[in-house]
Amino acid sequence: MKQILVTGGAGFLGSHLCERLLSLGNEVLCVDNFFTGNKRNIAHLLNDSRFELMRHDVTFPLYVEVDQIYNLACPASPVHYQFDPVQTTKTSVHGAINMLGLAKRVKARILQASTSEVYGDPEVHPQQESYWGRVNPIGIRSCYDEGKRCAETLFFDYWRQHKLQIKVVRIFNTYGPRMHPNDGRVVSNFIVQALKNEDITIYGDGMQTRSFCYVDDLIDGMIRMMETPSEFTGPVNIGNPGEFSMLELAERVIRISGSKSKLVFRALPQDDPRQRQPDIGLAKRELDWEPKVHLDEGLANTISYFRQLLA
Ligand SMILES: NC(=O)c1ccc[n+]([C@@H]2O[C@H](COP(=O)([O-])OP(=O)(O)OC[C@H]3O[C@@H](n4cnc5c(N)ncnc54)[C@H](O)[C@@H]3O)[C@@H](O)[C@H]2O)c1
């Protein structure tokens, strides 16, 4: 049994990670400031004596004893990370410094939840980990993209300078139950609009593509990454390479939910990437991992979660 700290543990991905780590027999300390996370996401874990919840902001130092740290704290959707962009950068950068400092003090292994946004609006497709990215440093998405890039830099400097055991995963679009219902992310947007039989909003012509990884697959990849030999640091892409246009996604959501919604088209937001798809060759080789859940199956689970939530 390990003692494991999950920052951002009351969020969408964090709550699934806490649940999985407990089911594997570990003790879990969930740290969250509830900016975008919610107690509802982890309410079912509170009766487990191996689970502990702590309200804390990672931009401040934390003193606890743990064996492993999964650093997920950071608002992840544009609506939320653009709400207070300075705090977003602080969360990524000061949060990384504080968690790396903690890892150094207690000699814990630490994993960073980085993002495909470090590739920005990429010129290469699909993106391999060796691609350095094309990111606007002064735009409205930069607080998130550059914050996450700087966090990666800090992880690798702590590794080189202090010999920390680091792991960096670059997460591509992930969806599933417990996504925030109105954070503007495409899957939750479409599902909520479809369940309310409202118009489904497509930005641009809807031909821009995204890949969508179901949360269970993602969590499996993250845990496998944490358990790799110490010399393997990543970064490693975790995502589902299956590529779908926004139009295809909307049509699937309408079909699976049995909705009467119509599609409406709106202007593309600033710096919105046209295309993003992970190359998961490295994850396949090093983690023996690849996604298993088909989009229709994942959407059905997510739709049934939102159906209950909206009821
Ligand atoms: N979901 C995705 O598709 C995706 C893609 C790429 C990367 N990621 C990364 O994965 C992580 C989790 O994302 P998510 O989708 O679960 O988002 P989320 O918003 O549901 O979870 C983030 C959690 O961090 C907490 N948090 C935010 N600022 C904090 C702070 N200063 N101190 C303590 N807690 C704080 C929030 O309250 C929330 O519970 C994030 O770091 C995100 O950047 C997610």
Image: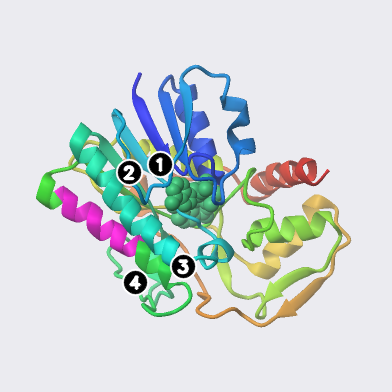
Tell which of 10 and 308 is nearer to you. 10
The answer to whether mark 4 and mark 2 are in CB contact below 8 A is: no
Q: Nearer the viewer's eye, disc 4 or disc 2?
A: 2
Badge 4: residue crowd in 10 Å (few <14, some 14–19, many ≥20): some
Label 1 to label 4: alpha-carbon separation: 22 Å
The quarter of the picture where residue 5 lies is top left
* Residue shown at 19% from the left, 40% from the top: 104
- Measure the alpha-carbon separation of dots 3 and 1: 27 Å
Residue 118 lies in what quarter of the image? bottom left
Q: Distance from label 2 to label 1 (Cα)? A: 8 Å
Residue 36 in the image: state x and y as whole percent. Answer: 56, 51
Q: CA distance from mark 4 to mark 2?
A: 21 Å
Residue occupying the far right of the picture: 260
Instruction: Indicate if the residue with disc 4 has its beta carbon within 8 Å of ligand 1.
Output: no
Give the residue type that dot 4 points to. Answer: Gly
Q: Which region is colored magenta? A: 148-159
Q: Is mark 1 within 8 Å of ligand 1?
A: no
* Mark closest to the chain's N terminus, 1 or 4: 4
In-front residue for pair 274/248: 274
Q: Which mark is residue 111?
A: 2
Q: Find out whether the residues at labels 3 and 1 contact each other: C-beta distance under 8 Å.
A: no
Q: Which residue is mark 3?
A: 85
Q: Looking at numbered disc 3 in the image, what kind of residue is underneath it?
A: Pro
Of the 4 image quadrants, the one containing the C terminus is: top right
Which residue in the protein does label 4 denote?
A: 133
Q: Residue 197: tell me if it is visible.
A: yes
In this rendered view, identify the residue nearer to me: 187 or 251.
187
Tell me the quarter of the image containing the N terminus.
Answer: top left
